[in-house]
């Protein structure tokens, strides 16, 4: 049984830091948008939880 190399199926945000494979501007923008989304969700959930009384 042969195992696949992990980097062949890793998500784009994990491989975008490797500059020698030709990272496109679209990948960089999508990675930044993903980070911004998750960064905004933390205070949003805290705010919603506070508004709900938790």
Image (cartoon, helix red, strand yellow):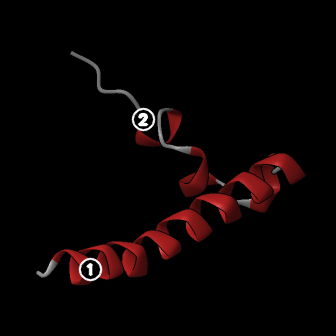
Find residue 5 and name its label.
2
Residue at x 58%, y 55% (from the top left corner): 13
Circle 1 packing at 10 Å, graded few (<14), some (14-19), many (20+), is few
Write down the residue under mark 1: 51
| Residue contact at pointers 1 and 2, CB within 8 angstroms | no
| Mark toward the start of the polypeptide (1 vs 2) | 2
- Secondary structure, mark 2, is loop
**Left or right: 4 in relation to 16:** left
Farthest residue, direction top:
1
Horizontal relation, residue 3 to residue 19: left or right: left
Q: Is residue 45 visible?
A: yes
From mark 1 to mark 2, how far is it between C-alphas? 46 Å
| Depth check, front residue: 52 or 25 | 52
Q: Quadrant of residue 1?
A: top left
Residue at the (38%, 76%) spot, across then down = 42
Going by the image, does 3 lie left or right of 41? left
| Quarter of the view holding residue 6 | top left
Q: Residue at x 71, y 52 (%)?
A: 30
In the image, residue 1 sits, relative to residue 39, either above or below, namely above
For the residue pair 52 and 18, the one nearer the viewer reads as 52
Q: Which of 51 and 47 lies nearest the eye of the viewer?
A: 51
Q: Secondary structure at mark 1?
A: helix
* The C terminus: image quadrant: bottom left
Answer above or below: position of 16 versus 3.
below
Measured as percent of width and height from the top left, residue 17 is found at 67, 64
Q: Is residue 4 left or right of residue 27?
A: left
Q: Is residue 22 visible?
A: no
Label 1 or label 2, whichever lies nearer to me, is 1
């Amino acid at each position: 049984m042969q195992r696949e190399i992990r980097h062949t199926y890793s998500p784009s945000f994990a491989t975008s830091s490797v500059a020698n494979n030709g990272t496109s501007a679209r990948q960089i923008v999508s990675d930044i948008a993903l980070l911004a989304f998750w960064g905004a969700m933390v205070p949003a959930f805290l705010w919603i939880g506070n508004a709900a009384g938790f």
